[in-house]
Every structure is written in C-alpha cells, then in structure tokens.
Image (spheres, grey):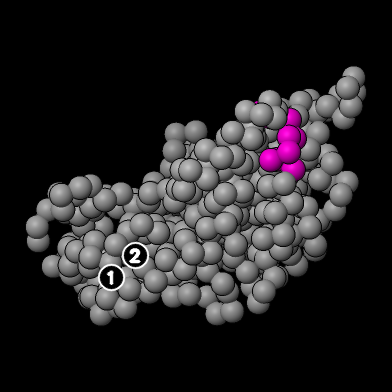
Amino acid sequence: MEKLNNPIYVTQPAMPPLDEFVDLMKQIWDNRILSNNGPFHKRFEQELADYLGVNYISLFANGTLALMTALQALRITGEVITTPYSFVATTHSLWWNNIKPVFADIEPKYLNLDPEKVEAAITPQTTAIMPVHVYGNPADVERLQQIADTYGLKLIYDAAHAFGVKIKDNSILNYGDLSVLSFHATKVFNTIEGGAIVCHDEKTKQRIDYLKNFGFAGETTVIAPGINAKMNEVQAAYGLLQLKYIDGNIAKRKSIAELYRQQLMNVPGIRCINDMQGVNHTYPYFPIFVDTKAYGKSRDELYEELKKHNIFGRRYFYPLISQFPSYRGLNSSKPENLPIATGITEEVICLPIYPELSMDLILSIIDNIKI
Ligand SMILES: *Cc1c(COP(=O)(O)O)cnc(C)c1O
C-alpha cells in the first residue's frame, strides 16, 4: 500500500463555522461577562439538558474536574469499585479524593464492568461503584443499580463516551446517581475542553454548582471546600454552536462505523464490536481486536505497520489503568484478578473515526488492515 500523504489521526475535532463563532465572540465582547454563570453558560446548560433529555446538568471546565466534584458531591469515601479498562482520569478522580480504587474485571462482549465481579469485590469499606460506558455501549445499568440498592452503594457513571446515547429513547445519563460527561476536543461533542455532571434533583444540582465555584453559596457564605471547575463563556458559546451541528456529525460517524464493520467483517483475525440492541449509538471510537494467530500479526505489529503508512491508530485502552505505577501495587490490580481486561488490552486498536474523514481515506485504512 501507498503511504498516505498526510498523517491520519484517530480523531479530529468537529469545528463549527468560524464566522458563526466570531459572531458569538462579538456578543461576549459586548457583554463583558467571561465566566461565573454568564448568559451563554445559562443558555447552553438549558439547551444541552433539552438535547440530552435530562432534567439537571451542571457544566464544568473539563471532565476530570467533573468526576472529582461528583465524588465530593456525594461525599464518597473509603473504597470505590471501578474498571481498569478506561482512560486514567476515571481512577485518578478517586485518587485525588483520597479514595482507594478497587478494580473489578470487565465482561468480554462490550468490555464494561462485569456486575458479578463488582458484587464479589464489595467490602465493608465500599461506598460506591464507578463504571464507564466503554465506547458508548451502556454498562449493565439495571443489574448495577440492583447491586447498589442491595448494598447501599452510590452509582456514579463515567459517561465520557456516552454523549447522546439512549436506551429505547431514554438517555443513558438518567441512570445511576450521577453521570459525568467530557467535552474534550477528542470526544463526539466538544467545547474545546469541558465536561458536565448530570443529576436527578434540584438539591443535588445546587450542591454541585456550589462545589464547582469554591463552595460559595452566597456573597459571603462558603458551605464546603469547593474547587474552581467552572465552564467559561467562550466554551459555552462554542458548545451552543456545536449543538446545532451535532446530529449531522453523529450521522457521519455512523456511516463510517458501518463501512468499517462491513469491510472488516470477513478479515480473518479481526473482530469488531456489534451494536447493542435497542441503543442509539454515537460512535465515539471504532475499536477492533486483533487475534495474532488468525491475523498473522500482533496488535502492536499492526499498529506499527499502520504508522508507517501515516495512519495513527490508538491503543485505547492500553496499558490497563491498574498497570500504572500509582495503582499496580493494589491487590485488585493483579492480572489474575482481571483476566478479561488483561487479554483485551493486548488486542485492541482504535481506528480513525471523525466526521471529516473521507470514504477514500477509510478505504485506504481498510486496505492497510486487509494485507
Ligand atoms: C476523556 C475521558 C475522561 C477525561 O475527560 P477530560 O474532559 O479530558 O478531563 C474521563 N474518562 C473517560 C473514559 C474519558 O474518555
């Protein structure tokens, strides 16, 4: 295969039309309000809640601060059961709150936390479960809620991959106690950097909004040691603009995913994840799994080969979070405790998927995998 002229990365942010963005910036210049729940922040919060189909949402400067604040909002302490198969920020948010992460294994089909492994990992110190909707495929929300109810645990979802995902017309964000979104430039929906917490009652939203603004509940009242995690007006205006184009962008992602799946279905040693029944997907990533024996090359060999042709896949998620120095000493990090995740992390590579990716480029990526 020919080397592509320009490097193709796994993602490229969708950008709104510049002239429309400039118009909104002019309004910010006129308003002279740059942060602290300004007019764009208010409008974006409302329009985003409507778009997502949720009742209460709080905007954040980024997803990691939103995760950290979510744990503070529910006063989580002790141990939290989570997945090793995610982006490091999921576990880091626990560490920053002085909470001990306890890793449980994933199930092999959709690579989400295995509820039975979660239940087996519960101790008297456990206070919450933090699952991730990996690649936007919903975790087993019904079973996880049952376990949380039985043992009196909180359920906080890292929903960074689950923007706009619905189960039978109900937002996935309506499950659990809290759900946390990321609007980083690499995600399906971005506000350059950004994030949000979805909750289900006004009191909780109020507490979250206090916590993200130093704990201020009034001019001279500070109710808790909060942090500064506020989304600013430029991010909010950019987000409002992005909302206008999000459905078209998701449709393009869908057609890319369909083409990949159709073309790679019969390649020996390459496996894709099938869409989950009854779920509206938004295709945040396109992972494939390499069976070295059947494919004739390992995942890393394919990764290097693609790189030579200017195609930059990403090994999401590799290594497992449990293998990083800060966490690998934990009992629950032992590979014997995490056999499925330990196998999958050696097989996965995510292929480029973003709205601007042309069909021609996708076909050359596929050709490079087929050889
Ligand atoms: C992107 C991501 C985050 C972090 O979000 P930021 O907005 O970059 O801080 C957390 N968890 C998962 C699963 C992610 O993919």
Gap between marks 1 and 2, in whole Å? 7 Å
Amino acid beneath label 2: Ile
Q: Is residue 291 left or right of residue 326?
A: left
Q: Which residues are magenta?
A: 34-42
Q: Position of residue 219 (x, y in %)?
A: 88, 22
Residue 10: in magenta span: no
Q: Is disc 1 surrounded by few (<14), some (14 to 19) or many (20+) residues within 10 Å?
A: many
- Residue 10 visible here: yes
Residue drawn at x 79%, y 57% as measured from the top left: 55
Q: Is disc 2 surrounded by few (<14), some (14 to 19) or many (20+) residues within 10 Å?
A: many
In what quadrant of the picture does the C terminus appear? bottom left
Q: Position of residue 255 (x, y in %)?
A: 39, 71
- Residue 339 visible here: no
Q: Residue furthest left?
A: 2
Residue drawn at x 52%, y 58% as measured from the top left: 245
Residue 40: in magenta span: yes
- The answer to whether mark 1 and mark 2 are in CB contact below 8 A is yes
Residue drawn at x 86%, y 49% as measured from the top left: 202
213, above or below 311, in the image: above
Q: Residue 78 has which mark?
A: none
Q: Position of residue 229 (x, y in %)?
A: 67, 32
Asked which secondary structure carries label 1, the reply is: strand
Amino acid beneath label 1: Ile
The residue at which mark 1 appears reads as 270
119, above or below 269, in the image: above
Q: Residue 288 has which mark?
A: 2
Q: Nearer the viewer, residue 62 or 23?
A: 23
Q: Nearer the viewer, residue 321 or 24?
A: 24
In what quadrant of the picture does the N terminus appear? bottom left
